[in-house]
Image (cartoon, grey):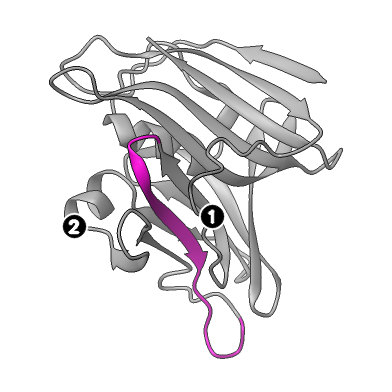
């Protein structure tokens, strides 16, 4: 088992759930930055993070449904309920990525009937929405979450109709699979206890787990 601990200073401010997703999708997962405020106006902040390689991808909540979507890249679960945000690649008829919107994010409302629901405007523009930047290769895009644009990941077309996202965790390159946000609802406003990000380390094939500690 391999474990790497990273602690850094930062001044970026983002919302509680936006931070959770920003760490997942924007690419630098092992560099959850110490001191990053997770909700403006509070003292809650990232205290540090650690990366561990394990044999199998952990299933944090076996009671939660796992989305099975065509073109799915990764998804986000929260402890509050089983409603899940799904991120899928958006292909044109010829199997290439749509350059105008290569990734689409939406809810699966597993807490009710499992129906698909679009993100609300505020969720798309300030929290969970993803934006893509073109590169010199029409099959490769840089991705960032709207709430944390400093962090980047890479979306690549592997073959017609199939794409993958890769990111970095310290010295490791990996494929993010899903994130789980442990939310504390005891107070007047929800707060985040911890964020776990699960992925697959490309060099070893082992599961990668990022644990982001929140204070």
Residue 157: image location, x then y, percent: 66, 68
Measured along the vertical axis of the image, is residue 124 above or below residue 179? Answer: below
Q: Could you say which is closer to the camera, residue 152 or residue 81?
A: 81
**Residue 138: assigned label:** none
> Any magenta on residue 104?
no
Locate residue 95 relative to residue 149 in the image: left or right: right
Q: CA distance from mark 1 to mark 2?
A: 25 Å
Q: Residue at x 71, y 16 (%)?
A: 4
> Is residue 28 something one can see in this rendering?
no
SS category of the residue bearing label 1: loop
Asked which secondary structure carries label 2, the reply is helix
Give the position of the C terminus as an image quadrant. top left
User: Which image quarter: residue 127?
Assistant: top left
The residue closer to the viewer here, 38 or 63, is 63
Residue 104 placement (x, y as % from top left): 41, 65
Residue identified by numbered label 1: 66
The residue segment tinted magenta is 79-95
| Sequence-first disc among 1 and 2 | 1
Residues 103 and 62: in front is 62
Q: Residue at x 62, y 37 (%)?
A: 198
Residue under the image location 55 percent in, 39 percent down: 27
Q: Is residue 197 left or right of residue 21?
A: right
Q: Is residue 126 left or right of residue 32?
A: left
Q: Which residue is mark 2?
A: 121
Q: Quadrant location of the N terminus?
A: top right
Q: Are marks 1 and 2 in contact (CB under 8 Å)?
A: no
Residue farthest toward the right in the current orientation of the protein: 204
């Amino acid at each position: 088992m391999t474990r790497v601990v990273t602690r850094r200073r930062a001044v970026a401010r983002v919302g509680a759930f936006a931070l959770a997703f920003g760490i997942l999708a924007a690419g630098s997962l092992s560099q959850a930055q110490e001191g990053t405020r997770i909700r403006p106006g509070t003292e809650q902040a990232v205290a540090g993070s650690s990366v561990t390689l394990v044999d199998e991808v952990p299933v944090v909540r076996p009671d939660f449904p796992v989305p099975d979507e065509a073109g799915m890249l990764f998804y986000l679960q929260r402890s509050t309920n089983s409603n899940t945000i799904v991120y899928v690649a958006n292909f044109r008829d010829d199997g290439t990525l749509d350059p105008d919107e290569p990734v689409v994010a939406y809810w699966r409302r597993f807490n009710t009937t499992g129906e698909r629901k679009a993100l609300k405007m505020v969720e798309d523009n300030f929290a969970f929405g993803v934006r893509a930047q073109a590169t010199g290769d029409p099959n490769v895009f840089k991705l960032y979450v709207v709430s944390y644009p400093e962090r980047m990941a890479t979306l690549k077309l592997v073959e017609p109709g199939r794409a993958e996202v890769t990111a970095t965790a310290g010295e490791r390159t990996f494929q993010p699979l899903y994130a789980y946000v442990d939310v504390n609802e005891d107070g007047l406003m929800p707060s985040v206890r911890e964020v776990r990000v699960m992925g697959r380390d490309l060099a070893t094939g082992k599961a990668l787990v990022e644990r982001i500690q929140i204070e």
